[in-house]
């Protein structure tokens, strides 16, 4: 996903502005009060449903409605417009200029579309993601690291999806226990088989000796049959 352009109308110090973005890293420069933070707030408001100020303070003084349009480009190069209006009335939708139609209408549909578009699939709250990772306010980037362990856990666990990994781990504990039990049963069976075949080498040697004796006896039997045939023949001559 790439932000191509941001349109601001009656947003804080902006009467109307179109800010384009190029490929790669973009630097937003300007003196204090020029509206750098407002631009970041507008992106967070439209793409992540997060606004660090009240909507009344977001609307330009003397105006009734503020309008933010963020032009985004998908991986396939197709562009969409995420539109967010607030003030005396609100609107939140995604517009596809290629087919000239709205793809969503209302907060619920739009947030679902953004989850899919941004690749979060609803696993992470978009507002939390923007507040704690994407659009951290100036001077607060390292603040979360200085918090107590419990507060750090509240901040980083949702971002790193630790709770999901813990749930998966809990789900794997029972199959793992069953596998350990099956392994132990198989090891006991193997030990029993090993005890049964412990005398196998001696038996194999005895079998070899007997097979040798059988072979020798068969040879003697053949010789004896040959001798008997000669005796029978000689007996016939004598008779």
Image: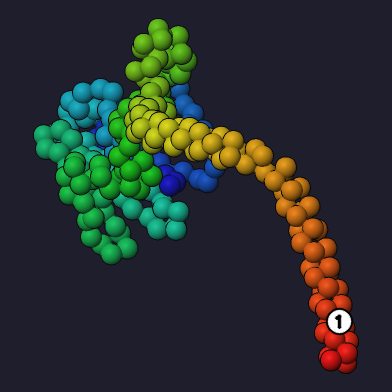
Q: Which residue is mark 1?
A: 231
- The one nearer the camera, 186 or 11, is 186
35 vs 212, left or right, is left
228 or 71, which is in the foreground? 228
Residue drawn at the location 26% of the way across and 50% of the way down? 94
Q: In which image quadrant can residue 102 be found? A: bottom left
Q: Residues within 10 Å of mark 1 (few under 14, many from 20)?
A: few
User: Left or right of 236: which side holds 154?
Assistant: left
Q: Position of residue 124 (x, y in %)?
A: 33, 34
The quarter holding residue 197 reads top right
Residue 158: % across, % down: 35, 26
Camera-side residue: 49 or 12?
49
Let me know if residue 61 appears in the view.
no
Q: Residue at x 30, y 59 (%)?
A: 97
Residue 201 shows in this picture: yes
Above or below: residue 231 compared with residue 98 = below
């Amino acid at each position: 996903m790439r932000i191509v352009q941001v349109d601001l109308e009656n947003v804080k110090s902006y009467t109307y502005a179109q800010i384009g973005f190029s490929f790669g890293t973009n630097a937003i420069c300007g003196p204090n009060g020029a509206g750098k933070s407002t631009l970041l707030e507008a992106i967070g408001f439209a793409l992540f449903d997060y606004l660090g100020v009240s909507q009344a303070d977001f609307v330009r003084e003397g105006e009734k409605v503020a309008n933010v349009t963020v032009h985004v480009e998908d991986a396939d190069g197709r562009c969409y417009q995420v539109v967010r209006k607030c003030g005396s009335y609100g609107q939140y939708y995604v517009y596809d200029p290629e087919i000239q139609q709205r793809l969503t209408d209302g907060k619920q549909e739009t947030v679902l579309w953004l989850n899919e578009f941004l690749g979060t699939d609803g696993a992470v709250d978009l507002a939390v993601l923007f507040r704690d990772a994407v659009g951290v306010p100036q001077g607060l980037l390292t603040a979360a690291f200085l918090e107590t362990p419990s507060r750090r856990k509240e901040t980083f666990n949702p971002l790193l999806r630790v709770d999901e990994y813990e749930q998966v781990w809990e789900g794997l504990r029972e199959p793992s226990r069953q596998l350990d039990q099956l392994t132990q049963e198989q090891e006991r069976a193997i030990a029993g088989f090993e005890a049964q075949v412990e005398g196998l080498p001696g038996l194999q040697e005895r079998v070899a000796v007997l097979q040798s004796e059988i072979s020798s006896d068969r040879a003697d039997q053949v010789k004896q049959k040959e001798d008997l045939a000669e005796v029978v023949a000689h007996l016939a001559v004598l008779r």
